Image (cartoon, grey):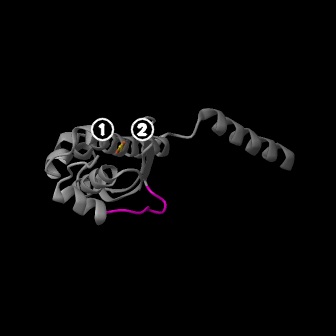
Amino acid sequence: MSLNYTKKTLAHFQNPKNIGQLSKPDGFAQIGNAVCGDQLDFFLKVEKGKIKDVKFLSFGCASNIATASVLTEKVKGMSIAQAKKYPWQKIVDELGGLPQQKIHCSIMAVQGLKKAIDNYEKRQEEKAKPIAKTNVKKKVGVKKLKIKAKK
Ligand code: FES
């Protein structure tokens, strides 16, 4: 059975944009589909609330690669808030359509990107957390002991 891919889908499959990985990403996610067995990894660099760079690795089909390629092209430079809302339908439109049985590839691509953004946001929350009070007390306790020992 041959699938009716558009010229644009085939072009992105044969020459994907933003393929690869980023060292020390600000956000990372891996997503897979248990039914088809395909997988995507997303890597994000974020600066001033915008996606400065985004790359992906694919372990999947032609539309898995093409949809991630288009998505990464579109969201690069976008604010995190905008990128989170990027709909899978826009990917399908950008490619000029996808075979019905390949629509889920575009859905997985946006879910993977959102998961990488969630990962970025969780890391930011962790960085912003104050030092736990229990740790502070322990450190103070050690200092007091040292002072007493000097007297
Ligand atoms: Fe499942 Fe393409 S067939 S992601």
Q: Residue at x 49, y 40 (%)?
A: 129
Q: Residue at x 29, y 64 (%)?
A: 14
Which residue is denoted by mark 1 in the rendering?
104
Q: Residue at x 86, y 46 (%)?
A: 149
From the top left corner, tell me how far across and down residue 116 is, in percent. 39, 46
Disc 1, ligand 1: is the CB inside 8 Å?
Answer: yes
> Would residue 17 appear left or right of 120 to someone viewing this image?
left
Disc 2, ligand 1: is the CB inside 8 Å?
Answer: yes
Residue 31 forms part of the magenta stretch: no
Tell me the number on the disc at residue 33: 2
The amino acid on which the numbered mark 1 sits, given as a three-letter code, is His
Q: CA distance from mark 2 to mark 1?
A: 9 Å
**Stretch in magenta:** 17-25
From the top left corner, tell me how far across and down residue 77 is, in percent. 24, 58
Label 2 element class: loop
> Would residue 148 appear left or right of 106 to someone viewing this image?
right
Q: Residue furthest bottom?
A: 15
